[in-house]
Image (cartoon, rainbow, N blue to C red):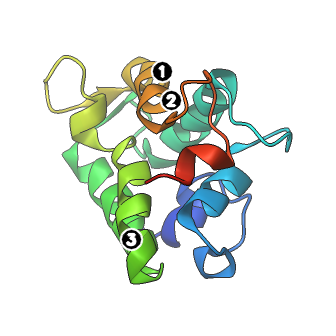
Amino acid sequence: MPRLPAIAFVLAAIAGPASAQDTAGAFFMQVWDLDHDGTVTLAELERMRGNVFGRFDVNEDGALDAAEYAPFDAARIDEAEGFESAEIARMTRIADGLSLARNDADGDGRVTAEEFRAGAADWLAALDADGSGDIGPADFATD
């Protein structure tokens, strides 16, 4: 599989490069807020995670194994490192919600499409700092 361009593609290629964003939170909002209403809902997370999953399931077997996860992990690490040092921890926390460890619900070393989409609820809860039930810019203000 060819090297993928950073997380802008990983996150469905709808945003510009992270360096064009002031913060990791702003970058996340630009990419994941599909209807551009200022919040990211569970439905938006599930939809985008389905898109991301499809891009990395190279053998199209309905699961991401360690070999398919390697370029996905590398792209997320590369993107986090593209931020200023104060934002790297925030971007890493965001990207952690897409990791194999966070999404392999049955612990078999593979993440199925269902596991990946289902992980959206836990990811939303982890990022929803204000407890509003969705993700907005305020959720990144207190990291």
Q: Nearer the viewer, residue 116 or 3?
A: 116
Give how far across and how far down residue 34 sits, in percent: 78, 41
Q: Which residue is mark 3?
A: 88
Quarter occupied by residue 103: top left
Crowding near pointer 3: few (<14 within 10 Å), some, many (20+)? some
Q: CA distance from mark 3 to mark 2?
A: 19 Å
Looking at numbered disc 2 in the image, what kind of residue is underneath it?
A: Leu
The total of numbered circles placed on residues is: 3
| In the displayed structure image, the side of residue 139 where residue 4 appears, left or right | left
- Tag 1 residue: 121
From the top left corner, tell me how far across and down residue 111 is, in percent: 30, 30
Instruction: Measuring from the top left, give residue 60's x and y in whole percent.
Output: 44, 35
Q: Marks 1/2: CA distance?
A: 5 Å
CB under 8 Å between discs 1 and 2:
yes
The tag on residue 58 is none
Q: Is residue 131 something one can see in this rendering?
A: yes
